[in-house]
Amino acid sequence: MRKLLMPLIALVAFAPVCAVAQSYPTRTVEIVVPFPAGANSDIASRPLAEALSKVLGQPVVVANKDGAAGTIGTTAVASAQPDGYTLGFSAMGVVTAQPHLRDKLRYDASAFDYICQVTDVFVVASVSKESPHKTFKDLVAYARANPDKLNYGHPGPGTVPNLLMLQLATDHGVKLNAVPFRGDALGFNALLGNHIDVLLSADATVAGKNVQPVAVFGDERLTQFPDMPTTKELGLGTGFGTPNGLFAPKGLPPEVLARLRAACATAMKSDAMTETMKKARQNMRYLDGDAFAARVKRDSDSIGSLINKIGRPKN
């Protein structure tokens, strides 16, 4: 009798999961962005949320939960119920870098289900238009001649912009003074007020600002700044970018994860989203969930090795 009942019991237990997955979503889905309004991740998240709302047939809203270099909001996502109603969207340095920097952080790269990569983010160095340093090489030369005198702004300890400057300082024997800001907006205000010498920020947030971008960390020039040299061209290393993507707490029902991945793929093909992202100067680059997860793993391993080389940043 027990052998006869076991398949029935399993079927009954599985039925609610199937029912939930098939009807998902039945209410508002929240996307947590762990950076403030106006930050690159926030800008990219909003057209995605709008497009997903249309695909999923339920409201998809963005909630900014910033602080501690993005770890407050990302921890909230990792700790949420894995039911598909709390998602995260961010530049993935919060997942690939921060776990290597904070001993008591309650997540790492394995704590999430990855839905899709949406954009690529490149780090740009900008100076004020009144700056005596007209090129990125000028900045490096000044730093070499004046240890600890060059003040550079960044979005927080262990963020990709911070790590890139620490890598440059280590590789080229210069000493810099790091100045963290809670979001790019505050950094740009400090740059325009000549309180810092250079700001490291996402490429999309530079466009339209009254500043002078002087270099992009990478090996290819950006289409929106075709005259701006790369750090590779300047002989200062290739650096690395980071993706913006959609993720969820680990353990989503497989049907819900598949639904979200399909919805993201459809949203990325939307003419409205493509046009909005273009106006926001975002570098759209879709990767499906598996490819996105693999990139996060590679980036996490690479950044872990970098931090072992340069040490943990203090600010």
Image (spheres, grey):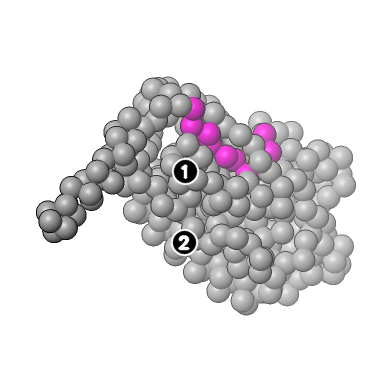
Q: Report the front residue among 89 and 192.
A: 89
Q: Residues within 10 Å of mark 2 (few under 14, many from 20)?
A: few
Residue 219 percent location from the top left of the image? 50, 57
* Residue 30 among those drawn in magenta: yes
Secondary structure of the residue carrying tag 2 is: helix
Q: Residues within 10 Å of mark 1 (few under 14, many from 20)?
A: many
Q: Could you tell me which quadrant the N terminus lies in?
A: bottom left
Specify the segment rendered in magenta.
Answer: 28-37
Side of 131 relative to 124 (left or right): right
Residue 246: mark in rendering? 1
Say above or below: 225 vs 178: above
The residue lying toward the viewer, choosing from 7 and 124, is: 7
Q: Which residue is mark 2?
A: 110
Q: Quadrant of the C terminus?
A: bottom right
- Check contact, mark 2 vs mark 1: CB within 8 A: no
Quick check: 163 left or right of 119?
right
Whichever of labels 2 and 1 marks the residue nearer the N terminus, that label is 2
Relative to 167, is 283 on the left or the right?
left
Report the amino acid beneath label 2.
Ser
The alpha-carbon separation of the residues under discs 2 and 1 comes to: 15 Å
Image x and y of residue 142, in percent: 81, 62
Helix or strand or loop: what does disc 1 sit on?
A: strand
Residue found 75% across the figure and 46% down from its top: 182
The residue furthest front is 1
The residue under the point 29% across, 35% down is 19
At x 45% / y 46%, what residue is drawn? Answer: 82
Amino acid type, residue under disc 1 in the picture: Leu
Labels in figure, total = 2
Farthest-out residue, bottom: 309
- Whole-percent x and y of residue 255? 30, 42
Compared to residue 257, the image places residue 50 above or below, namely above
